[in-house]
Image (cartoon, rainbow, N blue to C red):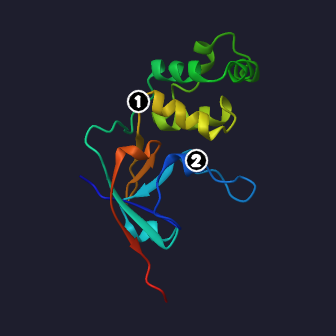
Amino acid sequence: MALWYHGGTTSRLRHNQHRWDRDRSVASLNAEGPGLYFTTDPDEAAGYGPVVVVAELKRGAEVLKPRRPLFGELLEFYDMAPEDDQERFLLDWGGDSPEETLSRYAHADTALDAFVQLYGDLLHYDADEYVSSMRALGYAAALVPREGADHLIVWYPGALDVLGVLEAEPE
């Protein structure tokens, strides 16, 4: 199993104490949407803070791997959104039905790309709603292959076994 590294200022990974996305008044959105970001590169993780948590995924944790979106999942994601967000989404896109409007997202390169687009277009950047929906779809995390080091966006920290913590040495 791969080791995953998360850099920050604390070693705690409890989901009820996390902001799932950045404060957009001072920073841009997380590139792959809300979640706890891990990498297979400990040096990259250390660039985000002096405390680097080392973890591995527990056996059986469901990971969204790179693949095309499944229309049924997009519809299920839509159905979980609050009703007022659903109505606004259809009005914004001029769609007569969720199926018609969601067909635009079915052509995304990956399912994660489609869900991140819906995070803005449907959920209006409600990070808690997004994370809850990804969990309800059965996913603990998403794998994002990168050249040099893969990334893992975690929505359910309970799917991780924390193996230890690395702390940067004082300079």
Front-lying residue, 60 or 107: 60
Q: Is residue 93 left or right of residue 9?
A: right
Q: Amino acid at mark 2?
A: Trp
Residue 167 location, quadrant: bottom left
Question: Vertically, is 101 above or below 16?
Answer: above
Q: Residue at 54% across / 24% down in the picture?
A: 77
Q: Secondary structure at mark 2?
A: loop
Question: Vertically, is 122 above or below 143?
Answer: above
Instruction: Mark 1 and mark 2 in contact? Answer it, CB < 8 Å.
Output: no
Q: Amino acid at mark 1?
A: Gly
Q: Secondary structure at mark 1?
A: loop
Residue 38 location, quadrant: bottom left
Q: Residue at 70% across / 35% down in the picture?
A: 124
Give the crowd class for mark 1: few <14, some 14-19, many >=20 residues within 10 Å: few
In x, y percent, where is residue 122?
66, 28
Mark seen at residue 5: none
Measure the C-alpha gap from mark 1 to mark 2. 18 Å
Q: Is residue 58 left or right of residue 74?
A: left
Front-lying residue, 9 or 148: 9
Give the residue number, with chain letter if any, for mark 2.
20
Give the residue number, with chain letter if any, for mark 1.
138
Q: Residue furthest bottom?
A: 171
Front-lying residue, 33 or 83: 83
